[in-house]
Amino acid sequence: MDAIFTLDQLSRVAAALWKEGDKKKVWAFHAAMGTGKTTFIHALCAELGVQSVVSSPTFAIINEYSSPIAGIIYHMDWYRLKDEEEAIQAGVEDTVNSGKLCLVEWSENAPGLLPDETFHVYMEALDEITRRVYTNR
């Protein structure tokens, strides 16, 4: 997938991305700060029928949501983690290996914990309102 979109097209792009990656259990989102990773994950969770509030897990590290389509979803933010050892101590490794859908922001901080079959999603800010999302297929 390779899509350029604005905020009003976000749900359509999130739905298309789900169609491409729905068989993958771990998704790693790669983007600079402020690109909209959490906003995109919010739209993806809405597409998956999550009813609870989807928010950044920057301080909690892991948020859990329930989806009638995907089951349990773990939304993780590894921004505050210094390295893989700290991630393991925070319970990230167990969560990634849980078999549940894991949506990971800032996976660069502990890349060794990602399984080989991770679905990598890349985002770029093209301007103030336009974003590009593409995958590793």
Image (cartoon, grey):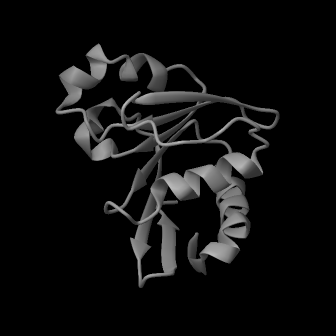
Q: Quadrant of residue 14?
A: bottom right
Look at 47% across and 21% down and name the residue there. Answer: 95
Horizontally, residue 62 falls left or right of residue 14, namely: left
17 above or below 116? below
Look at 52% across and 29% down and name the residue there. Answer: 63
Foreground: 46 or 93? 46
Extreme residue toward the bottom, this view:
127
Look at 39% across and 30% down and name the residue there. Answer: 61
Quadrant holding the N terminus: bottom right
105 above or below 76? below
Q: Quadrant of residue 99?
A: top right
Q: Position of residue 101 (x, y in %)?
A: 60, 33
Horizontally, residue 55 falls left or right of residue 66, namely: left
Total residue callouts: 0
Q: Quadrant of residue 53?
A: top right
Q: Position of residue 56 (x, y in %)?
A: 47, 42
Foreground: 36 or 72? 36
Q: Position of residue 72 (x, y in %)?
A: 67, 26
82 above or below 16? above
Look at 37% across and 35% down and name the residue there. Answer: 114
Horizontally, residue 117 falls left or right of residue 19, namely: left
Foreground: 8 or 98? 8
